[in-house]
């Protein structure tokens, strides 16, 4: 799911966890390149990357979290909602809500992103748009993305 930026090779879940541990111990964010398409249109595979930080005790709707779905399956998705059972997530390109994911499965959060070579931080327009507007449009996403694809090919 994640590419190690300097070597441009896929890394195993154990390697990415080790890299995060080293970065976090040094007080640094862990940069990772996006390889899956579930976070498009905000994050495009091979082009964009995120900078992960340790997850806070509680996450909020719209946070981008890096979690372990099952042993060896690491995922970067957005928090859709929280409940006493855990967190529910959805990718920006998806309409199916996944969860509950327990807090102990959450490894990190995206503190920043690099999109089209430009830094994106909480508070900037695109971060705000995908965190609020796009998240509210989950039921309509399939229709919106189909219409956009048709317009783009014309």
Image (tube, helix red, strand yellow):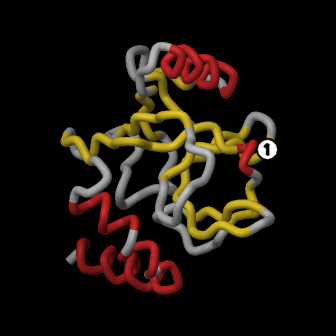
In the drawing, does residue 15 fall left or right of residue 23? right
Determine the image quadrant of residue 112. top left
User: Could you tell me which residue is drawn at 55 percent across and 23 percent down?
Assistant: 20
Q: Position of residue 32 (x, y in %)?
A: 44, 31
Q: How many marks?
A: 1
User: Could you tell me which residue is drawn at 41 percent across and 58 percent down?
Assistant: 40
Q: Secondary structure at mark 1?
A: strand
User: Could you tell me which residue is drawn at 31 percent across and 64 percent down?
Assistant: 128
Q: Position of residue 110 (x, y in %)?
A: 45, 43
| Mark 1, residue position | 70
Give the farthest residue toward the front: 57
Q: Position of residue 136 (x, y in %)?
A: 45, 80
The N terminus: image quadrant? top right
**In the image, is residue 44 above or below residue 154?**
above
**In the image, is residue 154 above or below residue 85?**
below
In the drawing, does residue 151 fall left or right of residue 15? left
Determine the image quadrant of residue 87. bottom right
User: Could you tell me which residue is drawn at 56 percent across and 44 percent down?
Assistant: 56
**In the image, is residue 151 above or below residue 112?**
below
Question: Mark 1, residues whose alpha carbon is within 10 Å: few (<14), some, or many (≥20)?
Answer: few
Q: Position of residue 17 (x, y in %)?
A: 63, 24
In the drawing, does residue 147 fall left or right of residue 69? left
In the drawing, does residue 127 fall left or right of residue 1? left
Q: Nearer the viewer, residue 135 or 47?
A: 135
The C terminus: image quadrant? bottom left
């Amino acid at each position: 799911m994640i590419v190690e930026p300097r070597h441009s090779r896929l890394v195993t879940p154990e390697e990415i966890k080790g890299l995060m541990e080293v970065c976090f111990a040094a007080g640094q964010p862990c940069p990772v390149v996006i390889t899956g398409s579930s976070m498009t249109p905000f994050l495009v595979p091979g082009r964009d990357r995120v900078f992960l930080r340790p997850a806070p005790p509680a996450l909020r709707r719209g946070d981008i979290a890096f979690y372990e779905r099952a042993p060896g399956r690491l995922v970067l998705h957005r928090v859709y909602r929280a409940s006493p059972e855990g967190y529910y997530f959805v990718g920006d390109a998806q309409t199916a809500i996944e969860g509950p994911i327990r807090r102990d499965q959450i490894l990190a959060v995206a503190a920043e992103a690099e999109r089209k070579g430009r830094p994106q931080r909480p508070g900037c327009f695109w971060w705000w748009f995908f965190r609020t507007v796009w998240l509210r449009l989950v039921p309509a996403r399939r229709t919106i993305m189909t219409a956009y694809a048709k317009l783009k090919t014309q």
